[in-house]
Amino acid sequence: MLRWAVIFFIVAIIAAVFGFGGIAAGAVSIARILFFIFVVLFLISLISGLVRR
């Protein structure tokens, strides 16, 4: 999931360089959502791993 967030972020940077503001804004919002989902899943995994020990 983190890989997809990075891919969308790179797409947003490339789109912004070439002047496609709408596409860049969409890609950034998707990357942000995926990153926060990754962080939440990581924290859940970390907490469940600590509880099992």
Image (cartoon, rainbow, N blue to C red):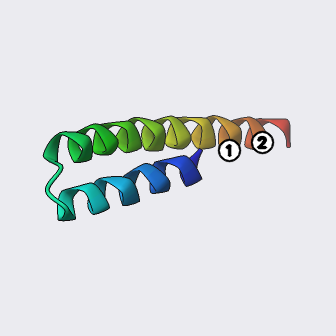
**Of the residues shown, which amino acid type is indicated by label 1?**
Leu
Q: CA distance from mark 1 to mark 2?
A: 5 Å
Query: Residue 30 in the image: x percent, y percent?
Result: 38, 37
The residue carrying mark 2 is: 49
**Of the residues shown, which amino acid type is indicated by label 2?**
Gly
Vertical side of 45 occupied by 20: above or below: below
Secondary element at tag 1:
helix
Circles 1, 2 touching at the beta carbon (< 8 Å): yes
In the drawing, does residue 16 fall left or right of residue 34? Answer: left
In the drawing, does residue 36 fall left or right of residue 20? Answer: right
Q: Residue at x 33, y 43 (%)?
A: 27
Query: Residue 46 in the image: x percent, y percent?
Result: 68, 44
In the drawing, does residue 4 fall left or right of residue 33? Answer: right
Residue density around tag 2, few if under 14, some if 14–19, many if 20 or more, within 10 Å: few
Quadrant of the image for the N terminus?
A: top right
Foreground residue, 22 or 5?
A: 22
Could you say which quadrant of the image residue 14 lies in?
bottom left
In the drawing, does residue 29 fall left or right of residue 36? Answer: left
Could you say which quadrant of the image residue 53 lies in?
top right
Q: Residue at x 60, y 36 (%)?
A: 41
Query: Residue 48 in the image: x percent, y percent?
Result: 74, 35
The residue carrying mark 1 is: 46
Query: Residue 7 in the image: x percent, y percent?
Result: 48, 55
Foreground residue, 43 or 52?
A: 43
Q: Residue at x 42, y 49 (%)?
A: 8
Could you say which quadrant of the image residue 38 lies in?
top right
Vertical side of 11 occupied by 52: above or below: above
Secondary element at tag 2:
helix
Residue density around tag 1, few if under 14, some if 14–19, many if 20 or more, within 10 Å: few
Disc ID at residue 10: none
